[in-house]
Amino acid sequence: MRLVLLKYRRPPSIISLSRISVRYTSTGLKDKTMATVNKSAHPFDKGRLEALLSRRFFYAPAFEIYGGVAGLYDYGPSGSALQANIIAEWRKHFIVEESMLELDTTIMTPAPVFETSGHVARFADWMVKDVKTGDVIRADHLVKNVLEARLAGDKEARGQAAAPAKEDEKDKKKKKKTAKAAAVQLPDDVVKSYEVTLAQLDNYSGAELGQLCRKFNIRNPDTDNEVTEPQEFNLMFASSIGPTGQHPGYLRPETAQGHFLNFSRLLDYNNGRVPFASAQIGRSFRNEISPRAGLLRVREFTMAEIEHFVDPNIKSHPRFKEMRDVILVLLDRHVQSSGSTTLIKMSVGEAVEKGIIANETLAYFMARIYLFLLKIGINPDRLRFRQHMANEMAHYATDCWDAEIHNSTGWTECVGCADRAAYDLTVHSAKTGHPLVVREALSKPIVTEKEKHVETLDESALLKLKEELAKGPTTITVNGQAFEITPGLLRIERKTFKQSVREYTPNVIEPSFGLGRILYTLLEHTYWSRAQDVDRGVCSSCLSSVPELMISQVFVASKFRRAGIFSRVDDSNTSIGKRYARNDELGTPYGVTIDFACV
């Protein structure tokens, strides 16, 4: 008996996730049954999911036999296939549907590029050190984890926390001991203070994080030792280019600069017309301070980024009408600044009209991001868009919203959607002398009249000087030096100027996707256990598949192959039930059982 396992490339909205059992005979399809399953019979168990992902080699710590390095992971066959399918869906959803220009730019970047972009000076996080052991911890994560643990202990003491699920003895032995906050009831004003602090956490400076550590007596939870004052730590990996080491460089922390430096070529490729978008999928690197959350915080990762170039005076979008009724769950900066995390549901059209989302183009891409995440299987009830507060805004951004996905660690930023204005193109143009601008021929020339002569003076200053000269000699200051002039030395005339070409630096709207984070949260959202057996875990993501293409000579398998459907034949000696269970874990959506009667 053989089991042919199929990989479908259709979106999850089309594919049923219920078990479909198909039995073939020599005369063809004889019987087809569909059974409903209860996916919420058991509470989510992160330990079981992680054991499954390790056992089935979705991913694993890199260099594991050498002891491993925190924040570096290798994807196995199943994880690689899942990531490839997410990328394929992303490419169709954005690059193909939006007619974007795809790039593939270099990872190694000369230092002057990031010095100009501001990353060398400002691409940093705040860290603290254990005063005795020297252990390094990211400051905002320390505050967040300690306060959340105390609030959880308060809820348990008040009887508000759910009772923990019972564990089998074998599970207890497998799991490592982890620190747990004592069940201590806190005064109501302390609870409120903690909640307000957590709501505003992303807006605190390094000095303010240090004050919080002192105010709330926050220590290293692993040692109970005090921590130092926060210090800034640049997240870029430094390197050098060439054998002499005279050309410093960095591994890129984002793919964006490759778009901006190639802007002139992209504009020319697009026949000089704006708006247009470029897109890139590739590796980026960030030297995270304390990566302890699996794929959610890593030092090397795959990004998918879009740079949408737009006229700064026209930030409408031609397809906005298609998206204006999409409902998003929003957490804006004003709500957070007030110490609250209250969410609101609102259409993107209404959010633009009320000024909550800055412009149509930003809102359009937020809606498209939302639809993409739903398409690949993210639970919409665990998805929100949070606006950056002033202090956490990247140095290049004027507005930014994060698509945050809820998982076992809390809310995690998986996609950022930023309005970078004209920052990057402006600074690179100023540094290199290469104009990164759009030159737009005007259908109707603009005619203006101006006083013209002294270049360092603006229009109002020229008019004032003209009036003074009409009365006799006067003094002007140029570049810090004073000069006395007479009407005979300088004449200011009013001239007519005709402008046929408008020159401007476009603004940029940037959606930026962390594919590893999306992959992991997708696995959490689609993992469940069979009602009759908690140890039978299932990943029901339709984008995952058995990766090896061991296509059999069986007639049915060859027909699938000719139809463009990837499949694998499982002809092992184990029972058919075990083979089904094995592929439940991998997330294989369909299994066709072929018995001897078929042959």
Image: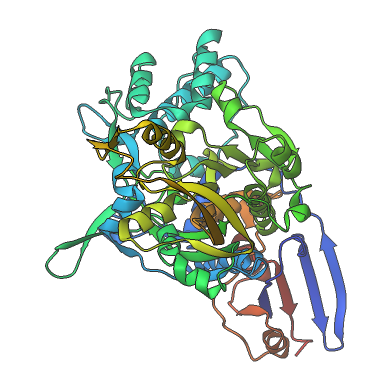
Picture quadrant of residue 282? bottom left
Please determine whether, in this image, residue 175 is positioned above or below residue 301. Answer: above
Which residue is more in the foreground, 498 or 540? Answer: 498
Quadrant, the C terminus: bottom right
| Residue 561 located left or right of residue 235 | right
Q: Position of residue 48 (x, y in %)?
A: 54, 48
- The answer to whether any part of residue 544 appears in the image is no
Q: Which residue lies furthest to the left in this view?
A: 244
Picture quadrant of residue 392? top left
| Residue 497 located left or right of residue 287 | right
Q: Identify the residue at image location x=73%, y=86%.
A: 556
Q: Identify the residue at image location x=56%, y=9%.
A: 188
Q: Where is residue 367 in the image (x, y as percent from the top left)?
A: 68, 50
Please determine whether, in this image, residue 158 is positioned above or below residue 143. Answer: above
Picture quadrant of residue 563? bottom right
| Residue 480 located left or right of residue 19 | left
Q: Position of residue 516 (x, y in %)?
A: 49, 56
Colouring mode (rainbow / by chain / secondary structure / one colour)? rainbow
- The answer to whether any part of residue 464 appears in the image is yes
Quadrant, the N terminus: bottom right
